[in-house]
Amino acid sequence: MSLIVQKFGGSSVANAERVYNVADIITKTYSQGNDIVVVVSAQGDTTDDLIAKAKEINQYASKREMDMLLTSGEQISASLLAMAIEKLGFPVVSLLGWQAGFYTSSAYGGARIKRVVPDRIKKELDKRNIVIVTGFQGINRYNDMTTLGRGGSDTSAVAIAAVMNADLCQIFTDVEGVYTADPRKVKNARKLAYISYDEMLELATLGAQVLNNRSVEMAKKYGIQLEVLSSMTRKPGTIVKEATKVEKMLISGIAKDEDVARISIIGVPDRPGLAFKIFSKLSAKNINVDIILQSVGRNGTKDISFTVSQANLKETIDILNPYVELIGATSVVYDENVAKVSIVGAGMETHPGTAAQMFEALFEANINIQMIATSEIKISVLIDRSDADKAVTAVHNKFFSEAMEA
């Protein structure tokens, strides 16, 4: 007998037909003698609809009340799925995040899991119940409901798998696994049989929406084997596991992120410590900075450019504008019409010339590069947003068409 954690995203439970399809997957796994814990997201676009309803009432609703509202989405899908399993004649119980033992920080809207105490889950499994848990949520020290942020149900599932030493954690979605690029945009994108934790973490962080990056980080930390697969086709998916057991491809995938803005501080005095002071201001407000480029000094000044998420753009500008005058810089300018395109692959470490191939593909597609960032297993470029899809296709064709020819 194995303990299997299965997570189903919003598209998998979007309507009654799909709920019954998911119930069939779960009960078939259960009938094979396995203990099953299921984590579900809110149905379809429910979370977006709830956010829209909130804005109709109060554009500036507190994050606490937003969490009270948004946690209802998962409660609906969990109870409906339990009803479908009941109808199929199987023992089942649905639990809210707090009932399942999820204790979180108090950061409403983006809470972190502090610990999971799965006593109730264990009791229900001992009764041979299928256990359904609402993803994306928990409870803080004030006994308030909290949410884990977008993609938090993936993190909920991996957290349960970790604390209960599950044999497998399956993440069911609307695609058949992890692809070399978004198969909805790139026709010849290939499904990967395996991918390493590090490669998956980079892809998730860089904009690939298959898995939440926090869930991959947790899976790596606790050695949880993940499988990403489709609830629609029921074909084998992509296994995410340690790199030592994975044959290294040159490039594992290409990701696009349009949730990005470029900010440039013009005419920063060229003296020690100013870059530290600028970025420490942003760090103090928990604003994450990604690609950073500093120009060569001229006339005693330099320009510093960097990227932040669209959500943090206004706050970043508000922080920098008054400070720029204090340090003697000229101005702050920004551009929202940019996108980040990245290639990721463990094989890049031992293959020189990978960057040149990527830049050649962009040149051949007449796409201008604004900024570049690299690491051992990734290369990211900042380009005009209108070129993003064309860039992904061009880079994908360069690497994977040549791989096929070789």
Image (cartoon, rainbow, N blue to C red):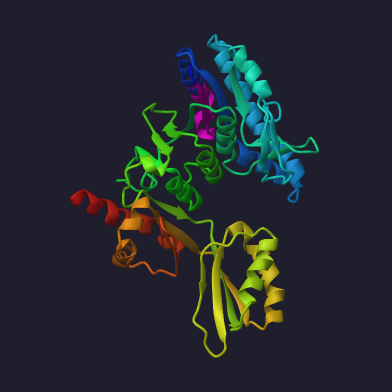
- In the image: residue 402, left or right of residue 34: left
Residue 27 in percent (x, y) is at: 49, 16
Which one is in front, 78 or 116? 116
Asked whether the viewer can see residue 344, the reply is: yes
Q: Which of the 4 image quadrants contains residue 246?
A: top left
Q: Give, as a single range, the part of the protein colored magenta.
A: 3-21
Residue 6 in percent (x, y) is at: 51, 27
Residue 189 in percent (x, y) is at: 33, 45
- In the image: residue 101, left or right of residue 222: right
10 within the magenta span: yes
Instruction: Identify which residue is drawn at 53% across, 11% down.
Output: 88
Residue 137 in percent (x, y) is at: 66, 36
Q: Which of the 4 image quadrants contains residue 280?
A: bottom right
Q: How many marks?
A: 0
Which one is in front, 188 or 54? 188
Instruction: Identify which residue is drawn at 63% across, 31% down.
Output: 74
Task: List the single residue furthest toward the bottom.
Answer: 299
